[in-house]
Amino acid sequence: MMKAFDTHIHLDLLSDLDAQLDRARKAGVSGWLIPGVEPEGWSRLLSISEQYADVYVAPGLHPQAAEQFRAEDLIRLRKLMNNPRVIAVGEVGIDTQIDVSLQAQEDLFIQMIGLAREAGKPLLIHARRSSGRILELLQKEKAEQVGGIFHAFSGTLETAQRILDLGFALGIGGVVTWPTAKRLPVVVKNVPADALVVETDAPYMTPAPYQGQENRPALLAEVIKKIAELREWSTQTATRVTTENARRVLNFSE
């Protein structure tokens, strides 16, 4: 039976990984993608991926690191793109809610899109109150050539359609299970099935009914369950569809 693939999880921030991943496998999850945030953490990501055969890496620079970006970082990233465990560039994008120059964020994002195109790797997009500008830059920089995933998507159906038109998928996480979520369930019910991939973003974005606790890998099952409910699928179908989508978008095979 096919198992779920978590397209965005910060395993480097979790403790007791052996036990956590074992519990996740028993819950029907087998495969994880760790995004990068800043250069200091890239070695740790690769170390984890070498320890677990079903863990992959997406090194990149989060917008919060934009003002510290150096030319040497790009040189190092280019080398990392040759590592077989590296299957994407992430997490990259624009965040208007942090105290970092928007110009620095945009300049870095353009560099990351260029790197992804050069390496032929998809992008993991961090978009916080910035989807419109991100879509403009993705289109201008021809990011549809590599595609990728809009991490932690929670926008409108209209925004979702613009993302899909560029060849990107929607990363659906714990927010879809929250009682307060209004727009995201509508999106999940109405977009084409091939638009959906799943993620935990652990240790963040804990799904209901576990809010208030640290998110963990096994709780991807709650996201799968909610998608199945919204789409009127079995959990097996939701798992199969989202995992096949992840493999296609991220261009890997386990």
Image: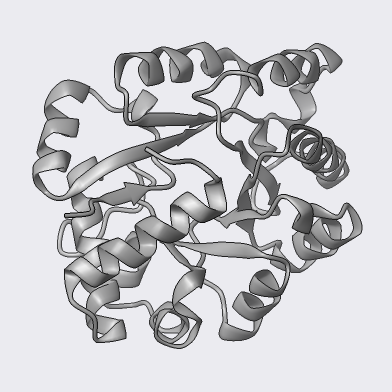
Visible in this render: residue 134?
yes
State how the image is colored: one colour
Q: Nearer the viewer, residue 211 or 254?
A: 254
> Which residue is rendered at x = 11% and y = 26% of the image?
19
- How far across and down, in percent of the image, does residue 9 sit? 39, 40
Answer with left or right where residue 171 lies relative to residue 53.
right
Which residue shows up at 11% across the image and 49% down it? 27
Quarter of the rendering containing residue 55? top left
Q: Residue 121: give x, y in percent of width and height.
A: 67, 39
Task: Between residue 11 and residue 116, name the one nearer to us.
Answer: 116
Choose between 77 and 248: the one closer to the eye. Answer: 248
Q: Position of residue 158 (x, y in %)?
A: 64, 85
**Compared with residue 212, is residue 40 higher up or lower down, i.e. above or below?**
above
Q: Is residue 38 left or right of residue 106?
A: left
Query: Measured from the top left, where is residue 28 in percent x and y?
Result: 16, 50
State whether residue 65 is above or below residue 40: below
Quadrant where the N terminus is found in the figure: bottom left
Q: Quadrant of the C terminus?
A: top left
Identify which residue is drawn at 70% across, 47% down: 93
Question: Can the viewer see residue 216?
Answer: no
**Point 80% across, 57% down: residue:** 138
Q: Quadrant of residue 99?
A: top right
Between 234 and 151, the one nearer to me in the picture: 234
Quadrant of residue 30 in the image?
top left
